[in-house]
Image (tube, rainbow, N blue to C red):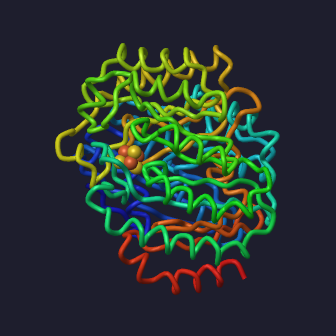
Amino acid sequence: MIKTDLPYLENDLKEVVNIFENGENLDIKHLYSEKTDRVVNTIVVGGKSYAFGNYIGENNSDIVRKRLIKRYAKLSLYKALSAYLGISAPWGSLTGIRPTKLAYQSINETGEFHDFFTQTLKVSEEKTELVQKVLSSQKNYYIVDDSWTDFFVFIPFCPSRCGYCSFITSDLRSASKLVDKYVDTLIYEINASKKFIKNLRSIYVGGGTPVALSDEQLDRVLSALDDINCGVEYTVEAGRPDVITENKIAILKKHKVNRICVNPQTFNDKTLKLLNRKHTADEVKEKYNMVKDDFSVNMDLIAGLPEETFEDFKYSLDTAISLSPDDITVHTLCIKRGSDLSETVKRLPENETEKMVEYAYKKLTSRGYNPYYLYRQKYASANLENVGYAKSGKECVYNIDTMEEISSTVACGANAISKRIKGTEIVERYAAPKDVASYLNKIEVILENKEILFK
Ligand code: SF4
């Protein structure tokens, strides 16, 4: 529990407390004082007191001062808990989901980010090097331009619900009545949203599992996108191998999709069963072989899955590399409220997960896969990150744009978040309702809001 002199920062400070295993059980006091250009944060924990003074500048704008006040409060708390518990975390006091965005911001303001990460935020040298590599991979893609647009379409249905899933996806069998209506409304929204596109950079149909739609439904949704497809990167998440068929592949080819995801998550059948995924590891290989010559393929793996050891993860990663897809994304398991596993899994084996993530980094970079986008999630095992690795020139533009927020996104579907970029700092968002029924009922309101966002 934390008591703070700055109640508006309580949630940010709790995020720092959660970096430390069982941190939420500590009694912590945060005292704050401010004089013209300096702040002092004092942390009292377990009868010990730690005080830190920092310069916030007399002439800085209110926005900059607020940002610095928050940064130093979090950093002071991190340093105090780190000293009290004798533990340092790989990402130091950094809790945000986009470390690379912060690195770009620091480079813009001071010309560098390395010292800011390692000395100010206490990020480890290893994670700072990872960020540096991601920035290098993004060199040819990182263009901040208000006119660039990504077009995103969301299909919130899956053939079954994975144990770790906390998305709003519905099991297709239980939602079958809604699906036709959803497809009709989605196509209506796609057509009404095309006018918001300025300079198209990519199309991304995600989910859920878009390929779990019937042949006819999938064909209809992709037909609605035909007239905007000008040969840009065009991704469809095939996701679950159990729904990839010859017919589906023919539909994707007909609509000139050039990138798909075939996601094993693990190559261990025992774990796949435990996760309620209705396919085997062999099926992933079989479907991958059916698509690999026609599409650039991404594979997702998860480190820290329940009942998996380091050897299990190593086997999955080595198998994925032996198949040689263009892109392998390594996620760290994240057990969020709302997922079935949140009922049964309490705390994940953090050391094992760290070992897995380190192994993935070393092995993938030694095999010609460069880390090119990265993000962090709350509740991730050991507070670790998700990293996309790709062969050179095979990076997914949409993933970079979304993580770095360097282009606008026109998004269609339930829970789809449209974003308007204005320069490097300002991002305005509009999120459509999460559940399918509200989405269907409020489609006109959704379009009105997008009109305001993109006007
Ligand atoms: S495939 Fe993805 S979206 Fe669908 S249930 Fe599994 S985790 Fe959730």
The correct choice, above or below, for 331 with respect to 307 in the image is below
Q: Is residue 313 above or below residue 113?
A: above
Q: How many marks?
A: 0
Residue at the extreme left of the image, as rendered: 344
Question: Does residue 42 appear left or right of residue 247 in this picture?
Answer: left
Location of the N terminus by quadrant is: bottom left
Q: Position of residue 384 (x, y in %)?
A: 45, 36
Please, is residue 202 above or below residue 296 in the view? Answer: below
Give coordinates of residue 277: x percent, y percent: 31, 37
Between residue 425 and residue 60, name the one nearer to us.
425
Residue depicted at 76% across the width and 41% down the height: 112
Residue 152 found in image quarter: bottom right
Q: Quadrant of the C terminus?
A: bottom right
Do we see residue 16 in this rendering?
no
In the figure, is residue 141 to the left or right of 376? Answer: right
Percent x, y of residue 178: 35, 69
